[in-house]
């Protein structure tokens, strides 16, 4: 029975590494996988999933207007797929997460989504919120704060190294723009955010 999986974390926890390893495990056993990532995330080049440790794979892309059920169904018409892997799942829309649930329920194909849980302001991404609500299984991928505690939050940094507390929810960047912190150190960096 296929399931919808969501593996989430903050930045630099190894989510893309885990995705690529899981896809490799399927392929090593002669099973095809279908990789999809956000179209506007060009850090590794459009249509490419890459890990900080240097491994990568080509992938199809999605943006907010794509019907992922139709896209995956079209791919299945070309040949069987043992598992669908979604990188940067936080950028999915709520409707797209429901489409992935339909892939699992109606096409009986497992979907493994990997993404951030919260943004730099401590708010859930829409895709992550929908996955937390709909996924059959969820797993937190852990990374650590500079203090050694589990990092659950992320801060966005300016080019001059200042912590930013305002701005668009989505701004693509990597190690130079974002730092993963535990909640205590995130609060110290951005101030208390209670409204």
Image (spheres, rainbow, N blue to C red):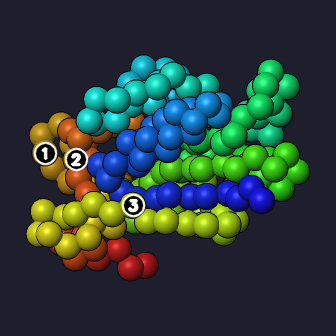
Sequence-first disc among 1 and 3: 3
Residue position marked by numbered label 1 in the rendering:
161
Q: Which mark is residue 141?
A: 3
The local crowd at label 3, few if under 14, some if 14 to 19, many if 20 or more residues have their Cα within 10 Å, is some
Residue position marked by numbered label 2 in the rendering:
157
Q: Position of residue 27 (x, y in %)?
A: 56, 32
- Residue for point 70% across, 59% down: 3
Q: Is residue 104 visible?
A: yes
Look at the numbered discs 2 and 3 and tell me whether their residues touch, using CB distance below 8 Å.
no
Look at the numbered discs 1 and 2 and tell me whether their residues touch, using CB distance below 8 Å.
yes
- Residue for point 43% across, 78% down: 195
Q: Secondary structure at mark 3?
A: loop
Q: How far apart, in angstroms, are the residues tagged by discs 1 and 2?
A: 5 Å
Q: Position of residue 139 (x, y in %)?
A: 49, 65
Q: Is residue 101 visible?
A: no
Q: Is residue 105 left or right of residue 186?
A: right
Foreground residue among 66 and 59: 59
- Residue for point 15% across, 49% down: 162
Specify the quadrant that holds the N terminus. bottom right
């Amino acid at each position: 029975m296929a399931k919808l999986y969501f593996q989430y974390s903050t930045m630099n926890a190894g989510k893309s590494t885990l995705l690529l390893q899981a896809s490799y495990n399927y392929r090593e056993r002669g099973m095809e996988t279908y990789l999809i990532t956000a179209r506007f995330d060009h850090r590794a080049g459009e249509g490419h999933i890459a890990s900080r440790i240097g491994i990568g794979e080509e992938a199809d892309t999605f943006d907010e207007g794509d019907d992922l059920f139709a896209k995956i169904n079209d791919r299945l018409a070309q040949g069987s797929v043992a598992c669908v892997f979604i990188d940067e799942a936080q950028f999915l829309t709520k409707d797209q997460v429901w489409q992935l649930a339909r892939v699992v329920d109606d096409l009986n194909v497992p979907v493994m989504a990997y993404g951030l849980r919260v943004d730099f302001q401590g708010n859930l991404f829409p895709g992550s919120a929908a996955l937390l609500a709909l996924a059959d299984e969820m797993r937190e991928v852990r990374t650590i704060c500079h203090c050694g505690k589990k990092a659950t939050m992320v801060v966005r940094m300016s080019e001059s190294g200042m912590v930013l507390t305002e701005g668009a929810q989505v701004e693509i960047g990597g190690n130079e723009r974002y730092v993963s912190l535990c909640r205590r150190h995130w609060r110290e960096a951005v101030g208390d955010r209670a409204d």
